Image: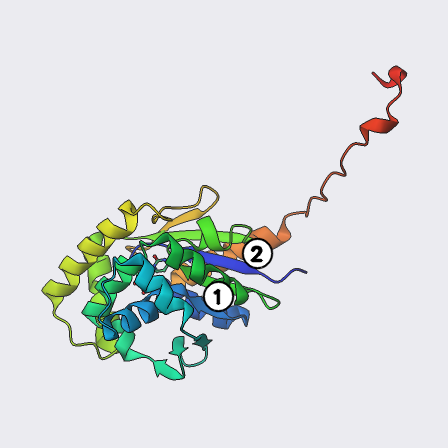
Amino acid sequence: MNPLTVTIDGPAGVGKSTVARSLAARLGIPYLNSGALYRAVAWKVSKRGIKPNDEAAVIDLCKQTEFVLVGPDNDQSVVIDGTRLTHELWTPHVSLVASEVSRLPSVRAFLRPIQRQCGNNQGVVAEGRDMGTHVFVDAEVKVFLDASPTVRARRRFRELQSRDAAVSWERTASELTERDNRDTTRYAAPLRPSPDATMIDTSDLSASQVVDAILALIRQEQARPQVEPTPPVDTTKRTQSSY
Ligand code: DC
């Protein structure tokens, strides 16, 4: 059987990381947190004092950076230029800068092959904003998670607290709205469901209920008879009588 690729897209705070991590562990395949890569770019951009909308300078910086994804055992973090980044990636400032650098088409194109490498050989559970629409377009199972803005703000607040980020509830809620707006209206790979994704509203579901729902989709997909591609018709062999 081919390695399994599952994409989980959706807005901030919807619970993608919790679900994707737990699903990957249940399936015994790698987990990709693509947002961590955008956050790592944002962290370095801020550290160097580069403006996040200066595309030439940001892409130049990316090209001089070595990105290594670490995980999934200890949650996924990114090592850039030998420095392992964990809680630094989750500050409110890095969240906002990540949202800004992720608008740049050249940055998205630069990070795409790094993300695809995670899907090689063993399969992957990939979470982000454009996993199903751009990065893993041939994924066997695509899911788009959504939830009401209040539920998402609450989840994001808890997640940030668990990552030791110093945050307030008001700030978390207002930044979530701001990021939603940016992520859905940007020109390059805006956040939207792939037409072949299954939508799951997680507002009233626990993380394990969402994982179970995705496992059911995977079983359904794997039980589907595989259709052999039809060989191309060789028109040179047609005689007149065949018409
Ligand atoms: O999932 P996250 O909150 O850690 O993502 C941080 C930012 O990165 C988010 O504002 C949008 C961007 N992002 C993206 O544009 N595409 C992805 N596949 C993942 C994240």
The residue that appears at 25% across and 61% down in the rendered structure is 52
Q: Where does the image place residue 234, in percent across and percent down from the top left?
A: 81, 32
* Marks 1 and 2, the one that precedes in the sequence: 1
Q: Residues within 10 Å of mark 2 (few under 14, many from 20)?
A: few
Q: Quadrant of the N terminus?
A: bottom right
Residue closer to the observer: 162 or 131: 131
The residue that appears at 78% across and 32% down in the rendered structure is 233
Mark 2: secondary structure = helix
> Dividing the image into four equal quarters, which quarter contains ligand 1?
bottom left
Quadrant of res 243:
top right
Q: Where does the image place residue 7, in percent across and percent down from the top left?
A: 47, 57
Mark 1: secondary structure = helix
Q: Where does the image place residue 224, in percent across and percent down from the top left?
A: 63, 48
Question: Colour mode?
Answer: rainbow
Indicate whether 189 appears above or below 171.
Answer: above
Mark 2, residue position: 219
Q: Amino acid at mark 1?
A: Ile
Mark 1, residue position: 114
Name the mark nearer the viewer: 1 or 2. 1
The residue that appears at 34% across and 65% down in the rendered structure is 38
Residue closer to the observer: 205 or 135: 135
